[in-house]
Image (tube, helix red, strand yellow):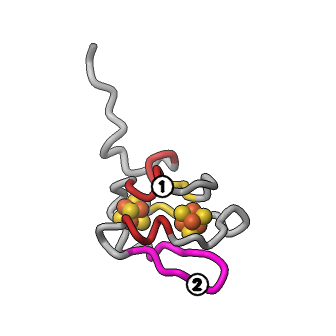
Amino acid sequence: MAFYIVPDLCKGCGACAGVCPREAIVLLPKRAAIEPVRCDECEECLFVCPNGAITGGLSDAGTGENNTVAAG
Ligand code: SF4
Ligand code: SF4
């Protein structure tokens, strides 16, 4: 499950594209979009978006990879 950008929240500032190490974010005329096949869920883009427009990933239960509850 890749991350994705909520179109209504994105202002197209491009900050996220600048930090994505996998070049998974493409800038469109008025917003950005994430190419799911490239996204590595590194979360870098989450922290730079000033509008909280980037979401998805682990919150959509399914992979179970990083959802294990460790003892203690
Ligand atoms: S989570 Fe990482 S790889 Fe995916 S779009 Fe954001 S910065 Fe790029
Ligand atoms: S940082 Fe946020 S508002 Fe700016 S282009 Fe990326 S998703 Fe859109």
Magenta region includes residue 52: no
Q: Is residue 42 left or right of residue 30?
A: left
Q: Is residue 48 left or right of residue 72?
A: right
Density class for disc 2 (Cα within 10 Å; few <14, some 14-19, many ≥20) is: few
Q: Quadrant of the N terminus?
A: bottom left
Tell me if residue 49 can be seen.
yes
- Image point (32%, 63%), residue name: 40
Read off the residue under disc 2. Answer: 28
Q: Residue furthest top?
A: 72
Whole-angstrom CA distance, mark 1 to mark 2, is 18 Å
Q: Is mark 1 within 8 Å of ligand 2?
A: yes
Quarter of the image holding residue 23?
bottom left
Question: What kind of residue is marked 2?
Answer: Leu
Which residue is the site of mark 1? 48
Q: Mark 2 and ligand 2: say if the CB distance to the nearest ligand atom is below 8 Å.
A: no
Q: Is residue 71 above or below residue 66?
A: above
Could you say where residue 47 lies in the image, as x and y percent from the top left?
A: 46, 50
Q: Which residues are magenta?
A: 24-35
Q: Judge from the rendering whether residue 29 lies leftward or rightward of residue 3; answer left or right.
A: right
The image shows residue 50 at horizontal and vertical percentages of 59, 54
Which one is closest to the eye, mark 1 or mark 2? Answer: 1
Element under label 2? loop
Q: Residue 27, image x and y in percent?
A: 53, 81
The residue depicted at 39 percent of the width and 74 percent of the height is: 24
Q: Earlier in the sequence, mark 1 or mark 2?
A: 2
